Image (spheres, rainbow, N blue to C red):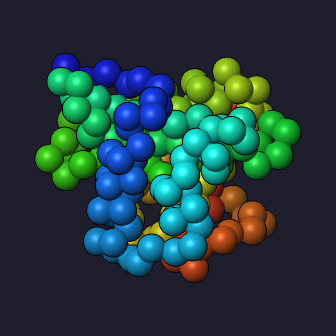
Amino acid sequence: MIEIVNFQPNHATAFKELNEAWINEYFEMEESDHKALSDPQGYILDKGGAILIAEMDEKPVGTCALIKMDDGVFELAKMAVSPEAQGQKIGWRIGLATIEKAKELGAERVYLETNSILKPAIHLYQKLGFKDAKGYCSPYARCNVQMELVL
């Protein structure tokens, strides 16, 4: 059974490991990755953001964060699903839950950054309603695609 839950301190290791795994598979860790993954409480939650965790049989298998940028604007970030749990629509479910959480937090827009080689992720974001966007300032060298969802 898959359940989407709010981040708790005991999820910190899974949040870090799930994200490090995909980042290191395709790219390399950058300074902003280290900040967010080493201190999710201070970097994301204490600033008005949120982190959701997908659990399968109470084991964390997916993550997604909302980082508050400006009033009404959040970044969807650090979405990851463990390889053994892929293909079970966990990305879709955690994506929908994250959009609902953004609405609860008063978001008017949610944007994200990704890379064009991550075609399954881009397809998922499109299915969730995200459209191509431009003009956001990215702290990541790897990001060459920006998308947003107007709520």
Give how far across and how far down residue 34 sits, in percent.
51, 65
* Residue at screen point 36% across, 62% down: 20
Determine whether, in the image, residue 82 is placed left or right of residue 37.
Answer: left
Give how far across and how far down residue 150 sits, in percent.
71, 38
Vertical side of 85 occupied by 43: above or below? below
Quadrant in the picture for residue 22: bottom left
Pick whichever, 64 or 92, lies toward us: 64
Give how far across and how far down residue 2 sits, in percent.
25, 24
Vertical side of 87 occupied by 52: above or below? above
For the C terminus, which image quadrant? Answer: top right
Determine whether, in the image, residue 145 is placed left or right of residue 148.
Answer: left
Task: Look at the image and tell me whether residue 145 can be seen.
Answer: no
Vertical side of 66 occupied by 7: above or below? above
Determine whether, in the image, residue 82 is placed left or right of residue 121.
Answer: left
Quadrant in the picture for residue 8: top left
* Residue at screen point 58% across, 42% down: 41
* Residue at screen point 34% across, 32% down: 54
Task: Look at the image and tell me whether residue 55 can be seen.
Answer: yes
